[in-house]
Image (cartoon, helix red, strand yellow):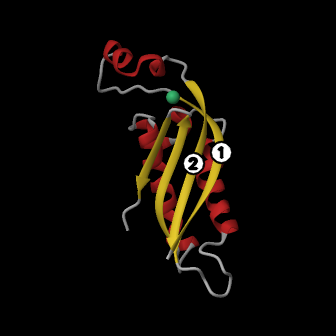
Amino acid sequence: MMRVTRCYHFPANHRLHTPLLSDAENAELFGKCNYPFGHGHNYTVEIAVEGPVRAETGQVVDPGALDRLVQSDVVAPMAHANLNCKIPEFGDLVATTENLAVVIEQRLRARWDEVFPEGPALCRIGIRETLNNYISKAVAR
Ligand code: NI
C-alpha cells in the first residue's frame, strides 16, 4: 500500500459567524474573523489517497481523474467565492477550516465510487489556511 497526496490551491472569502450566538458573542469568539464582510485566504487543500501501486500503470491513482473530480466539485465552485454565500453546506455550518474539510470530504465521497470504482481509497484531507493554521482530517473507510 502506498499513499499519494495531491495539492490544490484556490483563494476564497469567508466569515466566521454562528446564529447560535449573539452578535457580541460572535465578535468575542471569532474576533476579526467575524467582521461582517469577511476576509480572504489562499487555501491549499491536500487530498491523500491510499492503495496499491497498479502494475499496469505504476501509479496508485490516475492523477488526471483525481484532478478533474477535485476541480469540478471543490475548486471551481469555491475559488474566488464567498464560501458562506456560494456553498450551500455553509448555510448551516460555521465556515471554519475544520468544516471546510468536512464539506470537501462529503463532496468527494459523494462521487468517489463512481470515479474510482476500483480504488484507491480517499484517506485524508489537509487544509492550509494560513502559514500558522493547518488542519488534517482522516477519512473513515
Ligand atoms: Ni479566515
Kindly identify which numbered label has been placed on residue 45. Answer: 2
Q: The C terminus lies in which quarter of the figure?
A: bottom left
- Numbered disc 1: secondary structure: strand
Residue linked to disc 1: 9
Who's the residue at 65% across and 45% down the image? 9
- Observer-nearest of 107 and 33: 33
Residue 39, how many percent across, how many down? 57, 24
Q: Is residue 57 left or right of residue 33?
A: right
Q: CA distance from mark 2 to mark 1?
A: 6 Å
Residue 120 sits above or below residue 30 on the image: below
Q: Amino acid at mark 1?
A: His
Check mark 1 vs ligand 1: CB closer than 8 Å? yes or no. Answer: no
> Considering depth in this image, is 21 or 125 the residue closer to the camera?
125
Whether the residues at callouts 2 and 1 have beta carbons within 8 Å, the answer is yes
* In this picture, residue 78 sits left or right of residue 51: right
Could you tell me which secondary element the residue under label 2 belongs to? strand
The yes-or-no answer for disc 2 within 8 Å of ligand 1 is: no
